[in-house]
Image (cartoon, helix red, strand yellow):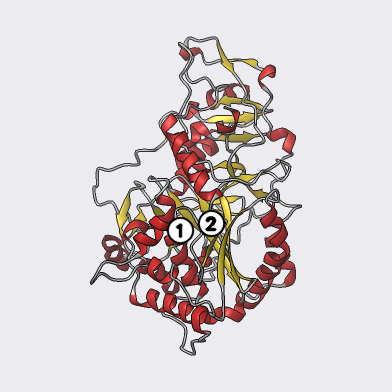
Amino acid sequence: MAAADSSPSIVEYFGGEDGYRCGYCKSDTGNLSHGMWAHSMTVQDYQDLIDRGWRRCGKYVYKPIMNQTCCPQYTIRCQALHFQASKSHKKVLKKMLKFISKGDVSKAASEEEPMDSHVEDAVACDFPYKAESHVSQSELTPLSVDHTERVENEDEDTGETKEEVNEQKVESGSRQICADKDTPLTGGPAHLAKIGHAPPKPGKGADLSKPPCRKAKDIRKERKLQKLLRNQPCMIEGSQFQAGDPGSVLQNSKSKPNQPKTIEDFVFVSLPDDAPHKLEVRLVPVSFEDPQFKSSFSQSASLFAKYQMAIHKDTPADCGEHEAEDGPNGPECGYGSFHQQYWLDGKIIAVGVIDILPYCVSSVYLYYDPDYSFLSLGVYSALREIAFTRQLHEKAPDLCFYYMGFYIHSCPKMRYKGQYRPSDLLCPETYIWTPIEQCLPLLEQSKYCRFNQDATAVDEGRIKELGRVRVLHKRIVMPYSVYKKRRKGPSDEASVQQYASLVGQTCSERMLLFRS
């Protein structure tokens, strides 16, 4: 069915040899990263990219140059299904519970972990290519199927004289993390199926005109998750749990005798009818087609500005610039991106931006009302997102990790992420996950480390055939081997080679690299 097809990701690669200001050590030019602008991005592509060390800030997707940047940033994920709250985590949960049920306001000093918790990655998102790409929407739209062309292949070494190149029609209903502002969006859950490849034509290689194949099992998984998200308008403190199957969640949240309490034991509890406060957590798709998102946008935007000015000392103009990324006149996030709005007594006090991906919930950003800093909302929201990941896992078994962005050992205030255990760090050379306990001794010796101790191990997803990289040129989708013959002017092979080596063979054959 058309609704099941996924339009391709379209990216514009920028490179990134020039240094810029670091938000962690404050070096003016020490922060080095590669970057690309995601005109559109499917959730499967973004999942594969973050598993190769990439991360997004709005529509800008970046990958630190790990062996050169001043503060190496290692992708960190928490094994949500096995997470055990620490003593300090439980203090935060108890503090919230006491505030909701009794109105108690803690006068204790801040917790060991910073109040901002998992938001610092976006604070350091100060890139030279932050402005929106100037490529027009018409240039990014591949021609429809009836405009199929035959492209001459001039590679004499292959013995072939022609290669048929077909364009993919971009469906407006594609499920994406990032979509252009002119693309109509509809509220809905993320596209969670793993994308396959259409069978090749005899002697022709992959047929680029066909949408990727999908297994019936993957479609069934996606439908289960869609149903879960539809049935979860909110998660409520102090009243009956209303998301998914309340029986199973509440049953699972009950600790066995002599077992430590879980997050769910603190979160999904019955409170007295006369509780002085009510906290409600609403899951809202990031789309102006969604009535909840649209109706709460003004309040959410005001909260964002208040947070940025109080916590990060931004000016009102700076706040407007950031918020425009989600505004009606700016680029919108599409499927896969959600807001978890924390409503206290009918007022939004915090908003957690998350991406729901095939194998994880990825935390993007959090902003909150500074008047409620005493509730340690950064830590609290991270724990709620871990609980939410476990809840989604019940309907989507492959979804079992909670990604917290980057772990930065060289920046002491960013080490708190290592306390959400068990967790793993991504090896920057082989892209293999390694338990953080094995990584910490290495990081004490050097801020840049290869975690995989097998000297023979290599990046299994590395680029092997540059000619198979998919390119969008003059609205025509073609492999790089064909584009290379048609290109006029200086060769761009070095740039394409760098791009392909960073995104890997799989993404390079699935995403479309825009070439003017």
Q: Residue 488: x percent and y percent?
A: 66, 26
Q: Residue 229, relative to residue 95: is it above or below? A: above
* Residue extending farthest right: 329
* Residue 477 found in image quarter: top right
Horizontal relation, residue 100 to residue 171: left or right: left
Q: Residue 188: x percent and y percent?
A: 60, 45
The residue type indicated by label 2 comes to: Ile
Q: Residue 30: x percent and y percent?
A: 52, 63
- Along the line of sight, which residue is nearer the eye, 202 or 281? 281
Quadrant where the image shows the C terminus: top right
Spatial CA span between label 1 and label 2: 11 Å
Quadrant where the image shows the N terminus: top right
Residue for badge 1: 388
* Residue 246 found in image quarter: bottom left
**Residue 354: assigned label:** 2
- Along the line of sight, which residue is nearer the eye, 14 or 51? 51
